[in-house]
Amino acid sequence: MEEDSDFRQWDELIPDALGLIFSKLSLQEILTVIPRVCKSWAKAVVGPYCWQEIDIEEWSNRCRVDLLDRMLRMLITRSSGSLRKLNVRGVHDDLLFSFIAEHAGSLQTLRMPRSMISDSIVEQVAGRFSSITFLDVSYCSTLGSHGLEAIGKNCKLLTGLCRNMHPLDTAGKPLRGDEARAIATTMPKLKHLEMAYHLITTESILEVLSCCPEIEFLDLRGCWSVELEDKFIKDNYPKLKVLGPLVVDYYERHDWDYCSDFSDGSSEYSEWDINGYSDESYAEMWDDGGGLEELELRFYEGVDDDEAGYGWPLSP
């Protein structure tokens, strides 16, 4: 006699519930472990519920350019227009950025530091990012004031902007106020602004403060030409917290490493995910009894202790 139970089987959960659960797992587990459990779980991974928030920033910092392109296109396509948050590093050309823009209807947070995007493509597609509230374009050396101005004019909901630069990218260059001016004139709702190591003047920052009355946090580390007295800030902007320009540990060592481009294409981390993967392969895996063994999981071969410590799952 079967006993009644209030508990449902895991494989009977609705896809959006499974997606919510799986979204708490690492990217590697979602793509290489979950699809092997059962057919319903594999279908959930292919659907949009796991990909409303995509965070591949760490992985993208260590992968080859071609793999990043394929991975990003695959995951964004799976989101089916429901993408709300995207963290990726090193978008390498305007075509890939344009692809992101085509699927940005619901996007609210976009972090894409150290990307190679031009002012011209930003001006063309900025209107597609109208839902953005937080944007990180730090260390994007090919982006300039015209691109920032286009972002400000089209992203009316923007309250947070990270536009930090690497000290080596700005060393020895003349002072410029065009980016600060673009921010001041087009982004009045900003509450959080980071402009570390920018070649800006005190006048430029005062213009930003005057035009962005809601600003609460301002990162000016390494902006050596900016002089803001504590008394002036307390008297005129009592809610504002300013970091810098001078900070004792002015550029943390991990930031130097984080900003450095040390991907040489040889990392094993870049090989486990894309090769052999497609949405069709998940369906075939469960329809064909031998399909499971054909799914390429090279990541699991020969993982050592150092790699395991990075956060990837050990071989099952």
Image (spheres, helix red, strand yellow):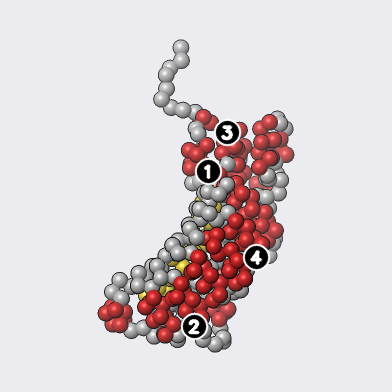
Q: Earlier in the sequence, mark 2 or mark 1?
A: 1
The label nearer to you, 2 versus 3, is 2
Asked whether disc 2 touches disc 3, contact meaning CB atoms under 8 Å apart, the reply is no
Q: Earlier in the sequence, mark 3 or mark 1?
A: 3
> Which of the labelled discs sits on residue 40, or is there none?
3
- Residue beneath the point at 50% across and 78% down: 179
User: Which residue is denoted by mark 2 in the rendering?
Assistant: 177
Cα–Cα span, label 4 and label 3:
37 Å
Q: Residues within 10 Å of mark 4 (few under 14, many from 20)?
A: some
Q: Residues within 10 Å of mark 3 (few under 14, many from 20)?
A: some
Asked whether disc 2 touches disc 1, contact meaning CB atoms under 8 Å apart, the reply is no
Rendered location of residue 75, percent (x, y): 60, 50
- Residue beneath the point at 49% across and 69% down: 153
The label nearer to you, 4 versus 3, is 4
Tag 1: residue type? Answer: Tyr
The label nearer to you, 1 versus 4, is 4
Q: Please say if 28 is above or below 185.
A: above
Look at the image and tell me whether residue 260 can be seen: no
**Residue nearest the viewer, comparing 108 with 1:** 108
Q: Secondary structure at mark 3?
A: helix
Tag 3: residue type? Answer: Ser
Q: Secondary structure at mark 1?
A: helix
User: Which residue is denoted by mark 4 in the rendering?
Assistant: 94
Rendered location of residue 160, percent (x, y): 44, 66
Q: Please say if 202 is above or below 109.
A: below
Cα–Cα span, label 1 and label 4:
27 Å
Q: Residues within 10 Å of mark 1 (few under 14, many from 20)?
A: many
Q: Please say if 162 is above or below 312.
A: below
Asked whether disc 1 touches disc 4, contact meaning CB atoms under 8 Å apart, the reply is no
Q: Is residue 293 left or right of residue 232?
A: right
Cα–Cα span, label 2 and label 4:
25 Å
User: Which residue is denoted by mark 1 in the rendering?
Assistant: 49
